[in-house]
Amino acid sequence: MIEVCIIGFGFSAIPLVRELERTKTNFKIISGENDSVWDRLDKSGRLDFNLVSSYHSSFYSFDLVKDEYEKDYFPTAKQFYEMHKRWRAVYEKKVIRDFVVRIDNFKDHSLILTRSGQTFQAKHVIVATGFTRLMNKLLNDIDYSVSNKTFVFGTMGDSANLMISKLIPNNNKIILRMKGFTPLDQQYGREERIFTLDQGEFQNARYISHEMYGAVMMNYITPKSVNPHILLNQFPLFNRDYSWAKAKAYPPSGTIAVKYWPIERYYQEFNENLEESISQGYLLNDITMWLHTGKVIIVPPDTPMDFENKTITYAGIERSFHQYIQGDAEQPRIPTIMIDGVNPYQYLYRDNFMGIIPQKLNNIYLLGLTRPMTGGVANIVEMQSLFIHKLVTQPEFHCKIHHNLSQRIADYNDYYFGNTEPRKTDHTIHFGFYTDDIARLIGIDHKVSECHSVKDLIFYYAFPNNAFKYRLKGEYAIDGIKELIEKINHKHGYFINIFSSLIKNFIYMEHVGDICEWINNGENIIFNNMKYKENYREFIETYIQAYRQVKNILIDETVDEEWDIMVKEACKVRDKMVEKIEENSSSKSDEDSLKPFDLISSIFNSDISSLPNSNDGNISELEYKFIDFIRSTWKPKEYDLPHLFLT
């Protein structure tokens, strides 16, 4: 009998295979021919874009330590796919090329049946077969060569936004007909300290206060402010309803975010070598800028459409459209699984602990069926692989996790979902919560009680919870991680900016409602700030001409008075908001913004136990308030999570 059998050999399986080899565990891999979404995009020549997740979260720890690290960035799809092929070549000889059609699961083993007629018996089975969805096919099939056409999108996500970024340079018009969505700048910060979106979330601050952390994060996502510069105030149809979210953990699992290059950051990064950058795959996909310039409009979800005649009616105009893009939810490509060889298994994300251990199956594990809201899937599957590896190689650990599995699942669901009904996007999670949960279960987590200095606390709270953070020590440590972390810390100013932001958010505000207004006031706006978009209107035309040059396309520019009327209607609220903008707004929060940073910098290497107290005449009352908060983070009040208890 095989000890471990892995079904499917794509990107997600690589870290697990690597660990099984390290411990000389008997395993086999059964997988069909290479036909992932990345393989199909490569065959059709459509790997001409960059990822919306950062390098830190898109590549595995064991790859990162081998690279000559310079800075975090957004890899191109070609770079990402090359990594896939490199690891595929390493393990290709270990793969049995066949297609699994059925798994019969019993108490102490599983029978794996393949299309060719082979049967394998295994003690542990890992299903790593990925997802299927219509959008993956559309990415390959859509005709980007058309011009001066209208496309209606009934969905919005990173894939849809990629399509839009390729359609707009051909003078196509885009109508978004939906219930809103959540766009987020994928890069932000000031020139001296630029952060990628997924690396500035200070995820462990949830242990200080779930309520305050949730208020901070959700008011970046759906701001409750009257500031006229904010996207949602200019285009309220963007607003996504999150009233369904009832859980303690925020942002809620199931949140879908659309990550985009804000035009001001795109300009800074690529303007000097625009055509070369476009040819590499760095495409401008600032959906907020497309709205600002009328290249995209968003309309209510009930806007009348005639699908048979392919028309949409808005602003009193019945307009023909070329194609309607309908979205769909990801569906796991799990083979047929029969419980005791008789009863079919029905997959539901909430029936699985950490999205990995199905409650109704024995020694079958799901790998790669959990997705991040921000960040790359590498963070998720690397930590999942370590968890699964420990389950299949250490019986004592297996027993600790399984002896109260039903209760663990209930506690997990209560924490992340509350009393809400299951949703199609339940598998989309806040990656930094997830990686820390897994690390705590495995026993490779960083403990705040082990922090001795302010520097240690900043690492715990502000350094992002990427998978490599947890491979610094313990049984899954990797050589070179310490040096990698030091390089990243140095490049990001040891994340003092992020920790300072944490303090400002938690200290300046005595109530959750105060956070809402402060975050979105003046220069504090981080995401979807429309204040500077107009400054880059001319650059849009420069970019479009460069794109056409790279793609070698000629477009007939046409006057479209009908579209202009529709844009005017879609921008009515925006135009009213612009009238309210006061260029010289200021706030007390902005005046005090540097104080936490300066203080933290001065005590960075200090022992926590030696921090000054209120009797020290050399510090102000405000500075003591900061220090008292820092001292309190040494013993966070909301650290205990029942689904992570190991008894």
Image: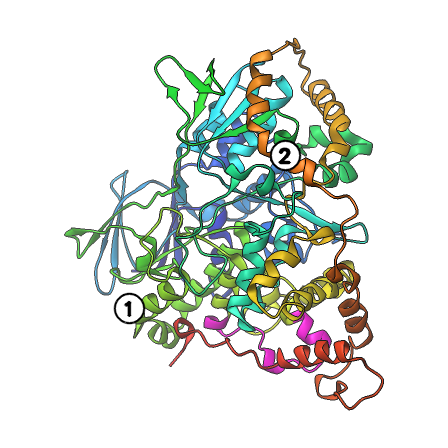
Depth order, front residue of 239/27: 239
The region drawn magenta spans 440-459
Place of residue 476 in the rendered image (x, y in percent of width and height, measured from the top left):
55, 68
User: Which image quarter is the N terminus in?
Assistant: bottom left
Residue placed furthest toward the left: 342
Residue 96 image-quadrant placement: top left
Place of residue 343 in the rendered image (x, y in percent of width and height, measured from the top left):
16, 52
The total number of labels drawn is 2
Q: Which SS class for mark 2? A: helix
In the image, residue 617 sits, relative to residue 275, either above or below, namely below
Residue 601 image-quadrant placement: bottom right
User: Which image quarter is the C terminus in?
Assistant: bottom left
The 10 Å Cα crowd at callout 1, few under 14, some 14 to 19, many 20 or more, is: some
- Gap between marks 1 and 2 measured at Cα: 54 Å
Q: Earlier in the sequence, mark 1 or mark 2?
A: 1
Residue placed furthest toward the right: 618
- Residue 436, disc: none
Q: Amino acid at mark 2?
A: Lys
Q: Amino acid at mark 1?
A: Ser
Q: Which SS class for mark 1? A: helix
Do the residues bearing badges 1 and 2 touch, measured as CB atoms within 8 Å? no
In the image, residue 399 sits, relative to residue 356, either above or below, namely below
Residue at 69% from the left image edge and 75% from the top image edge: 456
Place of residue 461 in the rendered image (x, y in percent of width and height, measured from the top left):
63, 69
Dot 2 corresponds to which residue? Answer: 576
The 10 Å Cα crowd at callout 2, few under 14, some 14 to 19, many 20 or more, is: few
In the image, residue 261 sits, relative to residue 425, either above or below, namely above
Place of residue 107 in the rendered image (x, y in percent of width and height, measured from the top left):
22, 64
Dot 1 corresponds to which residue? Answer: 406
The magenta stretch spans residue 196: no
* Residue 275 shows up from this direction: no
